[in-house]
Each structure stands twice: as C-alpha cells, then as structure tokens.
Amino acid sequence: MAEGMRGARGPRSSSSANSAPVILDIEDFKGDFSFDALFGNLVNDLLPSFLEEEADSGDGHGNIDGLGNGHLRGGQSDASRFSQMSSAPFFPEVDGLLSLFKDACKELIDLRKQVDGRLDTLKKEVSTQDGKHRKTLTEIEKGVDGLFESFARLDGRISSVGQTAAKIGDHLQSADAQRETASQTIELIKYLMEFNGSPGDLMELSALFSDDSRVAEAASIAQKLRSFAEEDIGRQGAAGNATPGRGLEVAVANLQDYCNELENRLLSRFDAASQRRDLSTMSECAKILSQFNRGTSAMQHYVATRPMFIDVEVMNSDIRLVLGDDGSLPSPNNVARGLSSLYKQITDTVRKEAATITAVFPAPNEVMAILVQRVLEQRVTGILDKILVKPSLMSPPPVQEGGLLLYLRMFAVAYERTQELAKDLRAVGCGDLDVEDLTESLFSSHKDEYPEHEQASLKQLYQAKMEELRAESQQGSESSGTIGRSKGASISSSQQQIAVTVVTEFVRWNEEAISRCTLLSSQPATLAANVKAIFTCLLDQVSVYITEGLERARDGLSEAAGLRERFVLGTLSRRVAAAAASAAEAAAAAGESSFKAFMVAVQRCGSSVAIVQQYFANSISRLLLPVDGAHAASCEEMSTALSKAEVAAYKGLQQCIETVISEVERLLSAEQLATDYRSPDDGFSPDHRPTNACIRVVAYLSRVLESAFTALEGLNKQAFLTELGNRLDKLLLTHWQKFTFNPSGGLRLKRDINEYGDFVKRFSVPSVEEKFELLGIMANVFIVAPESLATLFEGSPSIRKDAQRFIQLREDYKSAKLATRLSSLWPSLS
C-alpha cells in the first residue's frame, strides 16, 4: 500500500503494561484500505522482530522510521529495545497485544456507531430531499402540461390565421385575375371596336396590328377577338335571334381577313427564313403560326415546299435509279438494288428534315407525320406505279417477256423493300402516323388479286414447260428419223419420258410462290387459304404430268401388245413362217423395251411423289396447322390428286405382267421340244442340264425384271412379284401338260423346276416360293416307279388333284394301268 492507515497510532511504550490507547480515524478506512497495513501499524511498536523483518525486506526503499500509516506517541532507542528483548521472556508482548487489540476493538465499535449514526442522518436528509424533488417534478409536469395546452391553442390560432390568410390571398388573386381579365377585356373590346368598321377596312387599326415586331401579340389578340365574336354569334343563333348584331359580323369578317393577311405575311417570312436557313426566325414564325388552326397551314406549307416533292428532276432521277435508263426490261434483282438505294436516299433526306423540323416547329411529331405521309403517297407511290403494272389475267404477257412471274417478282421485291423503308421511317420518327398501315394501303389493289395472279402464273409456267418438252420431243423425233416397228420400241414410249428434274422444277416454282405468299399474307387464315390454293396448283401439275407420262408409257405397252397379236395371227399361215419369226422377235423386243420404259416411268413417278410429299412435310404443313382443318384438307387433296397416277400405274403394271407372261409363253412354245422330256433310252447318261426353253425363259426374266426390282419397292414390289409369280406358275403348269414324260424326262423337268425356283427366290415372296416347291414335288411322279406313287403325296394331300393330272402325262400311264391303280388308292379323285 502507498499509505496504509493514515491515522493509526501505537502505544506510548512497549515495556509497560499500561499502554496508551489506540487512536483510529474514520479517514483511515477510506480509499484503498488494507487490513495488513492496519495490523502492521498496530503491532510495529510491540513486535520489533516483525519490524526488523519488514526493514530487511524493504532494503533499497529507504530507512523505516516509525510506522508507515501511523506513528507512536513516544519511542525508545534501538539499543534499549534490544536489551529489553534479550532479557524478556520468549513472547512478552502478548499482554500488550491483547490490551492493544481490546482498545482497537472498542475504538472500532465506536467508529461503527459513529458511521451508523451518520448513515441514519444521511438517510433522513436523502428522504427529505427526495420528497422535495418529487414535489418539484410534479409541479414541473403540471407546468409542462399547461405549456403544451398553450402551444396547442397557439397552433390552432396560427392555423386559423393561415387559412384566413390563404382565403384572403385567393380572394386577392381572384380579384387580381378578374382585374386583369377586365383590363384585357377592355383592351379586346377596344380592338374589337376597331374591327367593327366598314367591311374590308383595315386601315384604321391600332399600331399593334401593323407592327412587325409585335406580330406575335397581334396574332394572339386577333385569335381571341375572332373566337369571342364567333362564339357570340353562335350564342345568338342558338338563342333564336336570326339577326345578330351587324357589328359582330363585320368584325368577324374583318378579323378573318386580317388573320389571313397575317398568316400569309408570316408564311412569306417563314419561306424567306427557310431559304436562308435561319432556324431561329423559322421557329419564331412557326410558333406564331401555330395559333392559326394549330399551325396546320405552316406544317403543310413547309412539307409541300420540300424539293423532293416539287422538283421534277428528283422524280425522274428516282425512275432512272430503279428502272435504269437503257430502256431494257428491268430484272427483279436490279429493281431490288435500285429500290434499296432510292429508299436509303429517302431515309437520309427525311432524317435531315427531321433535324430541321425538331428545331423549328413546336409540334415536330405532327410535321413528321405529314412529311412521311407525303413521302409514301407521292414519292414512293410514283415509283411503285412505274414498277408495278398489273397484267390482265385474260391476256397475260407472254413468258418470253417475263409473263406473270415477272410481275409477281416485282411485286414481292417492291413490297419487301417498301416495308423496310417503313421500318426505317418509323425509326427516324413519324409522329402518330401508322406508317405500316399506310404502306399496306399502297399495295392493297395488288394484294386483292394476288392469289389469282399467283395461280395463273403457275399455270402459265406449266403450259410453257409442256410446250417446251413437246418441242424437244418433236425435234428429237425428227432428228432420229422414223424408227421401224421391227427394230424396237414405239416412238411414243421412247419420247417424253417422266423426268424427276421437271417435277423438281414444279416444286421450285411452287416454293417460290409460297415464299411470296408468306411475305404478302399477314393473317394466318389468309396465309393458310393462299398456301392451300398454291399447293393445289402443284398437285394438279404433278398429277397431270406423271399421269400423262404413265399413260404414254402404257401406250408403248399397248403397241407392243398389238405387235404380238399380229404375230399370232401371222403364224396361222405356213407360207409366212420366216416373216412370223421376224415379227415375233420384233414384238419381243418392243415388249421388253416398253416394259423397261414403263418401269423407269414408275420409278420416276415414285420419286416425284416422294419429292412432293417431302416438300409438303417440310414447307407446307407448318403453314396450314394454325387453321383448323386446313392440313387435313390438303392431305386429302394430295391423296385424290395422286390417285389418278396410281390408277395409271396399276393398269400399266398389269400390262407389264401380260407382256412378260406373253413373252414367256412365246419362248416356251418356240423353244420347248417334245424330246426335252421324253429322251430316248439310248444307253447314254441322262442330260441334267436345264432345257433350252428354260434357259431362255430364265434369261429373259432375269433381264427384263431387273428394271422392276429397281423401280418398285415396298408393298408395290411385293404385290407385283406375287401376281407375276402366280401367273408364271399357272403358265408353266398349262405348258407342261402338253408333253409326255418318261423318267429321264422327269429328271430334266425337275431340273427346269429347280431353275425356275431358284429364280423366283429373288422375288422374296414366300407364297410363290412355296408354289414352285410344290411343282418340284409333283415332278417326282415322272421319276418314281408306279408302285411308289401311292406313298409319294402322303405328306401333301392338297396337291393330289394336280398330281393326278401330272401322272396322266407319264409315258407308261396306259401300259401300267395307272388310272385303275390310282382310283383304288385315291377314290375321292376318281
């Protein structure tokens, strides 16, 4: 501790039993109180050893002289105390300490009583002061409440005074306005009386109406006078007074004359400033002119005086830029480039005018609307009239001069470029003008008849293409000369074959027409109707083209059939056998050529139909789907249109089968010998090769059906080969029933049947393959011994009837009495 107890004092002498009382002070217990320090100050005089220990521990901190926090009233020297301590008992200070501690306790109790008394006094004083403080706070609160009430009354008074002042201000303002109005009315009446002179007399007017520096004020006053006079006349007329005051009528007439004269004067000043590019003067004049009919005359006058509307050279330059100046027939591409350049010039000009209009006119949007409308209705319409000359549908222009297609292409190009111009003008600014609707109206007369022109154009292109193909066919016929019937196919079957490129060209025409239709038809319903009509044109064209192509190919088959009939008739005469053989070969060549030609036609017909169907799926269907029923109706039309070609193809395929079967029959009749199946028993080994007739027939079938395998596919191919296989099976059965067979001949027949069977496996028709397998089984009737015939067909009872007919062709049928034997074995067949 720094001080310990500041007021503690020890006894006067340590050796005496009667020691002085300890003096304790309340101040010693304040601040940083330490009990150790208090105790040390009390016992230092009585315990010198304690003091020495304290001195030893306190070296370097100064000499200790007495107590740090108190002092003794009297002291002895160190030598005397030491001598006393050496002669005293071991702890002689105990009595002194007890006495000291008792005195200290008494003084502490007295100090506590003093402190308790002082605390009671302080509590009473605090309670008294707290009561006074609470009383003071209550009085202050009452004073504050009263103050708030005073403030509220004051605020109410202030609000009342403010409202009163506001009312007074309103009355004063109203009175001032009335005074100003009255003053202006007096002035207006004075000016009105000046206009109430003689009609047309404007010489006695105030200087205001002739002062060029006050023209804005004069215009405003003149408009007010005119409105007042006209309203007054209107009120008198509504009140039933048929004879209003003459003065007002004269005033109205004079005011009208003055306004007209003033307006003309301002327009002249506006024109002069416009020529000088004095925008400030122009703006001033425009602002004044806005008081006359909202400035309509000034706006229209400004737009009408633009060079692009009054300069003839500008219009001629537009025509030269778009159509050229060489007088040749313009192409759509050149017109497109010309329109793009022209419309860019127009946009740039309008953009420059927009800057001037914004700086001059108080209502620039209205002026821009008038300007853009004038551009579209005059300048754009002028060039469109030169480009788009609507052709007549009754007498359309020839294809050599572009035909209807040129007009449609020009129409699409002009429409597309003009739409782009409208967007550019909208971006520049055109006020409230519906520039897109106005642009649409420029083409309304053309769009009304567009679908008819598009369909007529497609028909014209088709007719021109057909004439071109006929001309090429005729030219080819003339250059190749007349082809003899004995050397090949007919002319009709070799010319004007179906070409996929032609159908592709039809689709390309239609695709171009659909692109124009999409561009020119804005509403989904209109678009769907136009697309459906245009696609129907394609269906009609393709249907007629491929149907006629198939019919021409059928004509070749018919001509070949005619040659076969003449050959059959010719064979009745032995004297013309050589000619008949030559005719037979010619008929065979014609039949084979016409067969291949028809298969090519069928293949190209299928490719053409696939192209149309793919085109419909990729380009047409999505345009029809938004309209209910349109897609289904077009699918139905497509099916109906192509059904004609399907009928022609079906008939032609039947003729092809007849052609093949007839030629096979001819080959069998000409090449099959009786000895082929009844070889003499000369001891040589049997011939296991197919007969010459079989070889010729299979070679012919392989050669002629190769085109069928390529041309046909899917169910069409399966149906065709099934029918042909069944007919071939019947033909062979009928043919073999003309011959008699011995066992070696039976083996050779089986070899022929295997050859035929191997060939028909290429058909991939299980039912036909099964028929030829059964033929191979029935051929066994010529090979087995008579006694084995009964067991030959145990596993195939369905062919016993045909087998019985084959058995009758056995060489030993009668000698072996096979009829009797078979009737006993198969009684149901007898």
Image (cartoon, rainbow, N blue to C red):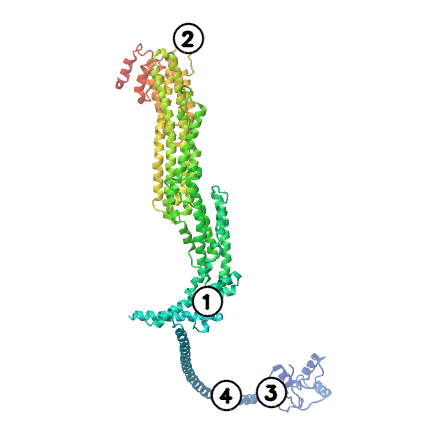
Q: Does 144 sit left or right of 739 as displayed?
A: right
Q: CA distance from mark 4 to mark 1?
A: 89 Å
Q: Which mark is residue 683?
A: 2
Task: Identify whether 195 is placed above or below 794.
Answer: below
Nearer the observer, 62 or 544 = 544
Tag in front: 3 or 2: 2
Residue 803 picture location, percent across and down: 32, 18
Q: Which mark is residue 221?
A: none
Quarter of the image that includes the C terminus: top left
Please give the name of the residue rendered at 50% of the width and 55% of the height, measured from the top-left corner. Answer: 349
The kind of residue on which mark 3 rests is Glu
Residue 364 picture location, percent across and down: 46, 62
Residue 223 picture location, percent across and down: 41, 69
Q: CA distance from mark 3 to mark 2?
A: 168 Å
Sequence order check: which comes first, mark 2 or mark 1? Answer: 1
Question: Is residue 770 among what the camera can see?
Answer: no
Location of mark 1 (residue): 288
Q: CA distance from mark 2 to mark 1?
A: 135 Å
Task: Identify whether 105 is placed above or below 540.
Answer: below
Residue 228 picture location, percent across and down: 37, 71
Task: Identify whether 94 is placed above or below 512.
Answer: below
Sequence order check: which comes first, mark 3 or mark 2? Answer: 3
The kind of residue on which mark 4 rests is Val
Location of mark 4 (residue): 126
Location of mark 3 (residue): 27
Please tell me whether mark 3 sits on a helix, a strand or a loop: helix
The kind of residue on which mark 1 rests is Ile
Residues at discs 2 and 1 in contact (Cβ within 8 Å): no
Q: CA distance from mark 3 to mark 1?
A: 101 Å
Quarter of the image that includes the N terminus: bottom right
